[in-house]
Image (cartoon, rainbow, N blue to C red):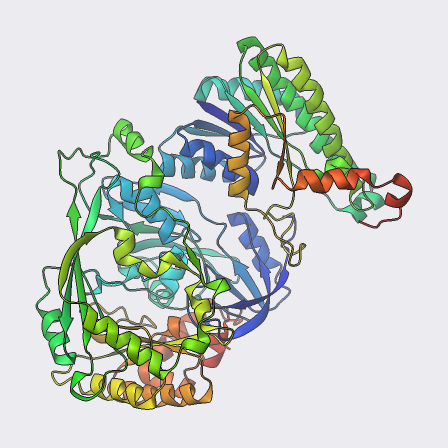
Amino acid sequence: MAVARWSQREIAGWGRYPKVRALVARPETRADVIEAIVDRQDEPILAQGLRRSYGDAALLTGRVIDMTRLDRMLDFDPATGWLRCEAGVSIADIAATFLPRGYFPPVVPGTKFVTVAGALASDIHGKNHHVAGSWSNHVRDVELLLPSGDIVCCDRGINAELFRATAGGQGLTGIVLAMDVQLERVVAGTEVGPRLAAIEMETVRVANMDEFVRVSGASGGYSYSVGWIDGAARGSSVGRGFFMRGRVTGAAGPARVIGTAGSERTAASLDRRQSDVTPRRSLVDGRYLSFNWLLNRVSMRTFNAVLYLRNGNSRRTVTFDRYFFPLDAVKNWNRFYGPRGLLQYQFVVPPDPQNRALHSALDAVAASGIPSFLGVIKEFGPQANGGLSFPVPGTTVALDFPNTGARLLGLLERLDDLVASAGGRVYLAKDARLGADAFRRMYPDWRQWKETRDRYDPGGVMQSELGRRLGLVG
Amino acid sequence: MSVLVLGATSPIARAIAREYARRGADVALGARDVAEAVRLAGDLRVRFGVRAAAYRFDALDYGSHRQLVRQAGEEIGSVDVAVVAFGELGDRERSIEDFESARIVLETNYLGAASVCEAVARVMAAAGRGTIVGIGSVAGDRGRFSNYFYGSAKGGFALYLQGLRARMYHHGVHVVTVKPGFIDTPMTWGRMGRLPVASPESLARAVAKAVDRRRDVVYHPWFWRGIMAVVRLVPESRWKRLKI
């Protein structure tokens, strides 16, 4: 590209609400990204990856740079697991490349279709937060392109303040070009076959919130855990659902360490179709199916009740894909929610023996009558990274809602107040509507974060719809 | 197996290099932007554990082409498949204003491509085996109102490949002409409206398949063969009125 080409497009996050018009460039190389920054015609700019954040974190009515073509893996050290890669490399790509060699991304969210830079911008967490912390805890040497055109490196050691602001900073501190990520050794490299490792998953039925907390507390031996909750349950059964805990189980047979040039090559040439994280063609595509008419209070109550009553405790071994990314099996499942889209509300509240805030929040949701089909609950570990990074010690709950307009927005505002009063916060990567005042109550570090950001971007070039809404930019 | 990709930094070339590395081939990458080629070579090594080398390659530096082919052969083993993937789209208005700009389009897509094909053909003919893949374009199937410089050079290249295929047939060397339709690259980004574009990865798979099956001329996506057949049928007296 001699000059960046900007294509006028309507873009939206995963929730398909809101939608904005933007001029989008898609650089093919690192040099193209720098060119695009120069060629932005003095308009605000934002980098985006695979747009899996739900709301407006990756949106900007302005110039947007699609980073997905920067997908080179630059270096890998099998001894330590450090992978250097460009910003647009996805977790799906890393898993497909490295699981056959016995490595897995250190932290994965509920979908594998996120880029490493998106993972840093949201400082994503996964089912192992209680033992592993979040994405930025496994990252070093982040190469950041500032709006000035300067390229700086940051991590916990150098430019530490910039690194802290970038982890969870929603892409507002600059454009990530590359980073090091430390992959986790999930099984000593073996060559016993393509099914190198799997997840031993145990499902435990829990009757209410207190039981959930008890089971969660007693699951220390499991590196991965998450709960499904019935958003319709009320009163004493608030929080009923399933607790799903898992751990890696290695393949049987003689282990041979991968690391020497010869054996690594053999591992790489394993038939990738058999590797269990290779993208499969999904049978269902939400683009052609909208169930919006079906999403109502009665169907939701029935769905959740049937799910709860039909399933009991179980223990089985499943593939990584099945355990970590079950929803990825349905392509574009967000489209089930129809043209108005969906909103996800994810919050965390600090630990409380009585779980008062959780009870009131879930009660308020059930009482509102607004259907929530998917409820997920998880206890975070002690790791908290400051700045705008979401995870803090406590319990997090995520609820999906069809966009029913004012009624839903009213409910979510009530929840904001409840969460903020309890010392909790909502997850910006899921958010499309939080007010600036509520945000400031939830993220007390915001002022310091903004000072750092303004120092590296004095012209206020990096912007997003989320940043504008929350008063983070300008 | 070893594969030489020329013009390696384009999305199509990158996808082809990855496709072959995935199959376990060692890959040599030639590109004007050698720093970028080095990054791509690293990507192939990390992902697939193959040998990958990067070279500076300038389509217009004809004198260097033989040397480059020799060097690649020494480093990754004698080349089994060579892919000529570079292209210079240019800008129609600029080409009309300033012939220098048109010259670069014509020279890169035709002379540069023919020169490096000759260099590869020489080595492959001596070895009595190998496949040369030339990436042309559906734009080369008929001269159009818009960007006929690019189209005529790609059309000339297709004729050249046809001749080369006939000559190399007698040396046991195969030549594949690939004619991509709309592929999701910077050439089409923001220009196609709602028209569907094929991914570079799907084109790469089609290229590897065409090499395996020793196909002569391949369109991708396949339906472009039909579209271009119709396009060629339009009488010239009508065609000249169309501003497409």
Residue at screen point 77% across, 41% down: B231
Q: Can you see residue B150?
A: no
Q: Is residue A94 above or below residue A25?
A: above
Q: Is residue B13 left or right of residue A443?
A: right
Coordinates of residue B27 in the picture (x, y in percent): 46, 28
Coordinates of residue B122 in the picture (x, y in percent): 61, 13
Residue at screen point 52% across, 37% down: B204
Q: Is residue A278 left or right of residue B132?
A: left
Q: Is residue B244 above or below residue B214?
A: below
Q: Is residue A57 above or below residue A280?
A: below
Coordinates of residue B95 in the picture (x, y in percent): 80, 43
Label count reads: 0
Q: Pick whichever, A156 or A137, lies toward us.
A: A137
Coordinates of residue A117 in the picture (x, y in percent): 40, 58
Q: Is residue A332 left or right of residue B157?
A: left
Residue closest to the far left: A218
Q: Is residue A414 above or below residue B148?
A: below
Residue at screen point 15% across, 87% down: A236
Q: Can you see residue B203?
A: yes
Q: Pick whichever, A269 or A161, lies toward us.
A: A269
Q: Pick whichever, B185 or B60, lies toward us.
A: B185
